[in-house]
Amino acid sequence: MRMKSFYLLALAAALAFTGCKKDDGGDPRPGNLTIEKTEYALDAVENRTATVAFTAAADWTLSVVYDDAESAADWLTVAPASGTAGEQTVELSAARNFRASDRTAYADLVCGEQSVRLTVTQTAASDATDFTAQFDPDFAKELQKQGIIADAENITSADMEKIAAMTELDVSGTYENPGTLTALQGIEYFESLTFLKCDSNQLTTLDVSANTALTFLKCNSNQLTSLDVSANTALTYLYCHSNQLTKLDVSANTALTYLSCSSNSLTKLDVRQHTELMNLSCSSNSLTSLDVSRNTALTDLWCESNQLTELNVSANTALTQLVCNANQLTELDVRQNTALTGLWCYDNQLTKLDVSANTALRWLSCENNPGDGVSTFPVKAWFDNDTKPDNLELDKEQWTYGGKTITIDFQKAE
């Protein structure tokens, strides 16, 4: 009887606890989602974004799912793709759709144990849509000339689908026969481009922000006053020399292995994050300093015709070519650069030079430096004046500086 009473009391307590929990008007269980709209329609070319608003009671994720193989190109992006509890907004963004049919993707929103599927449908561009106004007329004519489009005065959705799939484009001129393009309006539709040459034209602006797959960009010898490559994070080759650039920000382009920005009006250049950089040409600018201490992969450095007062290349042990003439250098230490085959350091303010460790040297140009200011320019080497190697080419062994005749004096290192 006593045991039966104990069980009845326990049962009553459990029922009371359950009843209290059921009637509790507290927060919803972790993982709950509140969202009103789950279907979204996007246009083919314009109006390709939508905002999703929802409330999450815990951490959440959003992932895109495609239902057909043709959608494997990841045409729908979401940002952000995850977050924490609270009121949230996510941006849906679709690539342009030049296919012949509409396409659908799904975005699965997961919070705790709850999942909600969003349906995103994007219409196809109509066959009758005329995209001609989206292109610079001369650029369109060049595309027609190359057989990329059929008619520069009637650019169709079929043309646009072909353009969107192209990976390489060359509309450059030549030094002997410069191109006449003044704008590349329409380049933004070349969404798959990895290679773009538009050098030796008359471009005053260039917008490559939509060409995020670019690894090679050659836009030198134009009239560009600015160049934004912040969206082109895959770039490995950038040729933008011989323009009118006053600044160049390559902080987002850390994959660069080749950078040529000579013959502009740059006053500073930051390449400290570019550890893969092998070839740097920044000649004929207005640089007063250049830090290459982290560019240990450098094999070629061209920084002549600037305003450098010092240059530290001690960390650049892979250097084979160093061109630093026509600066304001008072000293130059190349003892760590044992792979050097060419050294051009003329037209500076050097009083001496030590190449005793540079036994691979084949070209040396050190003229028009003051030397001792009297008669000689002392050069410590692995040889002396009487044993100069036959395979070492010197531009000059004697010159006039400050009214004095200066002669190279090779002194064999002990």
Image (cartoon, grey):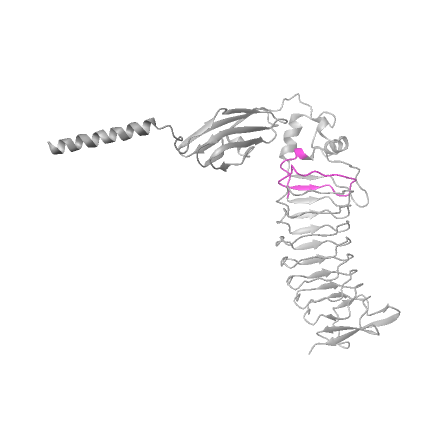
Q: Main secondary structure of the magenta part?
A: loop
Dividing the picture into quarters, in which one does residue 57 lie?
A: top left
- 220, 171: nearer the viewer: 220
Residue 109 shown left or right of residue 125 in the figure: left
Task: Give the extent of the magenta segment.
Answer: 188-214
Q: Nearer the viewer, residue 253 or 31?
A: 31
Residue 150 visible, this orientation: no
Above or below, comparing residue 410 to residue 146 in the picture:
below
Q: Does residue 285 show up magenta in the picture?
A: no
Q: Quadrant of residue 182?
A: top right
Q: Residue furthest right?
A: 403
Position of 23 compared to 208: left or right?
left
Q: Quadrant of the C terminus?
A: bottom right
Residue at coordinates 80% horizontally, 73% vertically from top-left?
Answer: 372
- In which quadrant is the N terminus drawn? top left
- The residue at the point 38 percent across, 30 percent down is 26
The picture places residue 244, in percent across and down from the top left corner, at 78, 45
Where is residue 402? Give x, y as percent: 87, 68
Residue 405 at least partly seen: yes
Question: As displayed, is residue 380 above or below residue 147?
Answer: below
Q: Residue furthest top?
A: 128
